[in-house]
Amino acid sequence: RHTAQSHRGAMAIDVATRAKEARIAYNVRHAIQKVRVCSPETLDELQSALMAELEKQEPELGSLLEQVRKEVDKGLELAQKRVELIENERKKEEKKLQRPKELIKEMTDMMATFQQKVDDFKESASLDDSKSYAAGRVKEVEEQTASFETEMLEFTKKLKEFAQGKSMEIQNSQLPLDVKRGWLETVQKVSKISKEAQVCIDAARAKVV
């Protein structure tokens, strides 16, 4: 009878110990789950947290220590593979967006160059001054205006052809909406700057008497 009681007592202690170890292991396993769904930005932080939790709980893991260590190693391995996969996907996405971004930049640069010409014409034609041109400046301004108008028409034609020729690349359904929107906004700016140029031309001619 004494032996049976001792046996039951030992079993109770064993069950309690295992239950305690399982509770301790849960803390580490919870940290493993977090690191397994990490991003490249959070890997280092979650990995450090996991190792700190393992170090903290190791003395209390008892019979589960080796098993939990293996789970930690496996979790870190999966986390690393996940990060590599995410980074590869990001590189593919960036490569896909590279061409559209180049086209938008090319058009933006062309517009910036022409915008400078518009600003230069405003200054040279004295458009901030509402007075008519002096007789001695009329011929000069007429020539400047004609030259600028030619540039404006060439610019509009070039940008229109550029936009039409590249639109199929931009309208690819796989591109993010913000990229498509950026392209459309850039195209709209072409129309805006062309109108601004025409307003300047009309204003210069209106000052010729």
Image: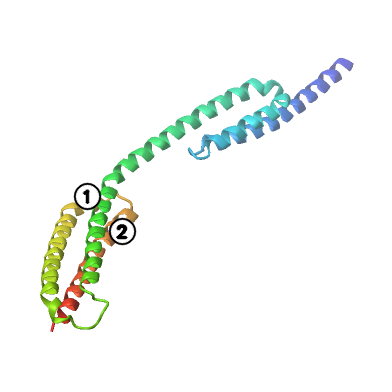
Q: Position of residue 51 (x, y in %)?
A: 62, 29
137, above or below 159, in the image? below
**Mark number, residue 169:** 1
Element under disc 1:
helix
Q: Which residue is mark 2?
A: 181
Q: Residues within 10 Å of mark 1 (few under 14, many from 20)?
A: few
> Which one is in front, 103 or 168?
103
Lower position in the chain sequence, tag 2 or tag 1: 1
Q: Residues within 10 Å of mark 2 (few under 14, many from 20)?
A: few
Inspect this view and state whether residue 1 appears.
Answer: no
Residue 4 location, quadrant: top right
Q: Residue 148 vs residue 193: left or right?
A: left
Element under disc 2:
helix
> Which one is in front, 145 or 22?
145
Cα gap from disc 2 to disc 1, whole angstroms = 13 Å
Q: Position of residue 50 (x, y in %)?
A: 61, 32
* Quadrant for the N terminus in the image: top right
Please name the residue shown 27% across and 52% down the image.
105
> Which one is in front, 12 or 48?
48
Q: Position of residue 201 (x, y in %)?
A: 17, 73
25, above or below 160, in the image? above
